[in-house]
Image (spheres, coloured by chain):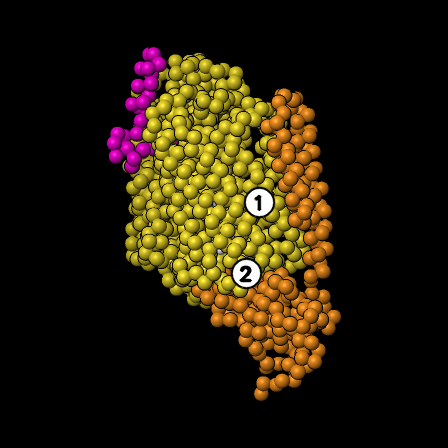
Amino acid sequence: MLAGAAAIFALVMVLLALPFLRRGKDAPEARGIKVWIIGLGLAFPMAVLAALLAYGLTVGERLLPRAEDGAIRVEAEGRQSGWTFRYADQPGRSTSGVLHIPAGRPVDVDITTGDVIHSFWVPRLAGKLDAIPGYVNTLRIEADAPGDYAGVSAEFSGIGYAGLTFTVTAHDEAGWQAFLGDDPQ
Amino acid sequence: MNALQRHRRLTTIWASDPGLRGWFTTVNHTDLGRMFLMASFFFFIVAGILAMLIRAQLATPHSAFAGPEIYNQIFTMHGVIMMFLFAIPTFEGLVVYLLPKILGTRDLAFPRLTAYGFWCYIFGGTMMLVSMLLGIAPDGGWFMYPPLTGPLYSPGINTDFWLIGITFVEISAIAAAVEITVSILKYRAPGMSLDKMPIFAWYALVTALMILTGFPPLILGSVLLEVERAFGFPFFQADLGGDSLLWQHLFWLFGHPEVYIIFLPAAGVISTVLPVMCRTTLLGYGWIVAAAVALAFLSFGLWVHHMFTTGIPHMGLAFFSAASTLVAVPTGVQIFAWIGTMWRGRPELRMPMLHLLGFFVTFVIGGLTGVMVAVVPFDWQAHDTAFITAHLHYVLFGGFVFPVLAGLYYWMPHVTGRKRFFRLGEFAFGMIFVGFHVTFLAMHWVGLLGQRRRIPTYAPEDGWTAVNLISSVGSFVMAIGIAMVLIDVILNVVTAVRGTRNPWGAGTLEWAMIQPAPAYNFASLPHVTERDPLYGTPDMALRLARGEGYLGEPRRDWRETVTVDIASGRPDFHVIYPANTRLPIVMSAVTGLFFLSLLLKAYWITPFAMAGVAVLAWRWVWSLGRKEDIGPQAIGQDITVPHAAQVARAPGWWGSVFLLTANATFFGSLLFGFAFLWTVAPGWPPTEWLPASLWELGLGLLGAALAPAAMHGASRALRRGGRPRLGLALAFGGTGMLAVSVGAMMLHTPPPVEHAYNATLFVLGGYAMFHVTLGALMIGFLAARVRRGYASAARQSEFPIVTLWIDYLAAVGALALLAGHLPGLLA
Ligand code: HEM
Ligand SMILES: [Cu+2]
């Protein structure tokens, strides 16, 4: 996408520079309209956009959660004081500031808020999705390898906004079983 | 009468009052335009200083420069001032100054309205500045999402300043938009048919129509949020049937068109200046007009792209993503038409051209990143990071500030009548250009590295330190450049190098007058036969000064002009403008009192302020009346046209049409909100509906049928020389029936604080009630006119205007009643 944009930019710059170098001649308007307006103004952007759109839609499609594929379900609740996470596989269990997930398996995060609007964003795992009062938004994430992934709130939420961060810890299979077995009660 | 005598005579008729008093009583568009521009540049400097504070804060990690409480106010106010107190008013000022001149006439349609809008802008802007000086400025970001900005999470007065102050300022945008629309359609030089209109006027027309349909959703949102904050009506509270997403829809329904409202006037400047800089004419005039219109239509269908991360259904995402990329097409048409214009001509690197090149480079990059963020998966990453901030500055600075600077250098000789003497501007351009790109390229980059927007500080481990420092250094280079432009302008005003007339060799009419412009613009009005009149008639200025055009002989102390038929440009009416008056500033001060009483919650003042506005408005309209018929007037060239008071479609009627367009958009947004909450919001249906009553509904609908019918009858009677009294009395009765019915509905609505349904119904009722009161006042006004002998068949133009308002009030009254009673009836 970046390369394409750079190429278009370069083209426009060249077209912009050339008239300074050559002596202009008042070409007939009809020809100018055909070349500049119909050719470059209409046809060219339409072709580029069609390609871009096809790309965007296919990539977008792959990011969608699909039903019944054995995804883990967790719940993320944002608050101005921090994020709290709950686990469908272990009702009653909750963690603050750290979301535990298994690596290599799709996870559906049900995002809600306890006060104002927030946004759940783990840049390395997925795009962001908002937490909006009265709604549950579901985001599909998947960590390829075990490890810690930084997450942030990405919708301005007042005074403590800068510090509103969390971590996603992806466990290998053994670690995940240990986490589930590690009953808090 | 020779040219000099004519100049003196017209100057005494048209000039503002002498001395300090003149500043407050002027209704002259040249003066008001300059005042507008000075004020908006002042706000640009203020917001620029805030930007420097932001960049100072972000230059280093763990910055201790400002805590989050203050920092949140700084970036919010930077955005708010730039968008509402700089960009829009700059458009208004430029158009107020330029439009009558470029259209070949003497003033805008409603000179007192120009002044009223200006003072509303000044008072509203002052309110915002005061909040900042007191450290209680808005701090929720420029788009103010509830519930963060709701009563629960922002109990302080900060948010109220935004909601009330900005709404106050918006009055000036709506006023200007009505005025610009009517001026362009009706107030042109004779002979200037639509296809001979300067391209700048087309852009201004499209922009004004966009303001009329784009701002009302924002005003509605602000009203609802303020009512929620002040009285607890839960429009945006999910647990009581409200929905915070309603705010986002209303805001962006305004916010996206806003971007084009800012860009299109700038595009008008480019289309005007660029051909002159290239010694040719614009390529594809018709195509450019079509592209601007297409852009306007498209821009109302894109707002959802600001909400891609809110969990919009998948189909919605695909649709709005496709639509968003589509705006690149009309934009592309304009860009390439301009480049094609350059190829046709011989571009010269004079001062305005430099800034135009700055525009091209910057705006094209901004457009390309814009297309990138319209792609949903990319936006899910980039949204709310510094990448977005950088993108929006490429669009706004590239698409607005550079063209405005080009326009500044282009029209400066027109305003000052002087020549640039020092070569400071070229150097300043270099600093601004380089500084800008360093600042914001770096911000793109750090955004891709994950830096969120609106954070007051970051840690060294984030790895953003160097990039941020580069960005901040760039911004200070840019600031120095802007300061140099300021110095350049001041030097230009004070140094006494007389310029030549029409220094750029332009073809448009604003150059066919002495510079600086005289108060009356043209000693006689031109007859236009081509798009660039000065190319065909280079000595136009002399001829007009000698009185060879229309209305060359000043009569009495009349400020006269003619209006034209919209499409053909044939002269149709004779108009006499009102003269200097203190009424606009007084009325906007009382309007300000109204807003202040809401802000300070001194609600006992509110009714007095409203009554004060009503009384002043009455005087405002009353003073236009005459006790004797004026009759048809000769305007020169053996043409005689009727006086505007005599006709059914007077300028005031057109003004009402466009004001009602904005008003209907407001009402439509309210109905949209109702439907949105009903179908989408979580807490529906409510536990109880309004108890429906066929009696109340029937009474109201009967009134809604009677009032307009009677009003049309009264109009017809007067036009035929008969007596309108019976019709007026019946119309008054009809509004009374509506008032009773709407009042009953509001009384029976369950408590508005308990559910958003009740609250919405109450607001619908309040809206209808307001219009019923307004309609009753208008009918009373006409009755007083008739009694005092101000109305006759030749002075009938006020009747069709009131008829229009009564039609509107009947329609909204009936719709509000139906919206209230139908659910209960059907249930
Ligand atoms: C004079 C040069 C300018 C500089 C150096 C500048 C700098 C900045 C910076 C650094 C931010 C981001 C703060 C953050 O969220 O982290 C910002 C935000 C913003 N700027 Fe500018 N800006 C400039 C001109 C403008 C202009 C001309 C406009 C509009 C006409 C504008 C409109 C905005 C808006 C709407 C925001 C978003 C505010 C918010 O997040 O609520 N800026 N600016
Ligand atoms: Cu947009």
| Earlier-in-chain disc, 2 versus 1 | 1
Mark 2 within 8 Å of ligand 1, using the beta carbon: no
Q: Quadrant of residue B68?
A: bottom left
Is residue B770 located in the magenta-colored stretch of the structure?
no
Residue B255 lies, with reference to residue B546, above or below; the image says: below
Is residue B16 located in the magenta-colored stretch of the structure?
yes
Q: Residue at x 61, y 68 (%)?
A: A149
- Identify the residue at the far top of this view: B2
Residue B400 lies, with reference to residue A66, above or below; the image says: above
The residue identified by callout 2 is B463
Q: Residues within 10 Å of mark 2 (few under 14, many from 20)?
A: some
Could you tell me which chain the residue with mark 2 belongs to? B
Magenta stretch: dominant secondary structure:
helix
Q: Whole-percent x and y of residue B677?
A: 54, 60
Q: Residue at x 43, y 50 (%)?
A: B51
Instruction: Report the Cα–Cα distance between label 2 and label 1.
Output: 26 Å
Per the rendered image, the range of residues in magenta is B1-29
The residue identified by callout 1 is B366
Between A163 and B435, the one nearer to me in the picture: B435
Disc 1 residue type (three-letter): Gly
Which corner quadrant holds the C terminus of chain A? bottom right
- Identify the residue at the far front of this view: B466
Give the structural element (helix, strand or loop) at label 2.
loop
Could you tell me which chain the residue with mark 1 belongs to? B
| Chain corresponding to orange in the figure | A
In front: label 2 or label 1: 2
| Chain corresponding to yellow in the figure | B
Between B715 and B8, the one nearer to me in the picture: B8
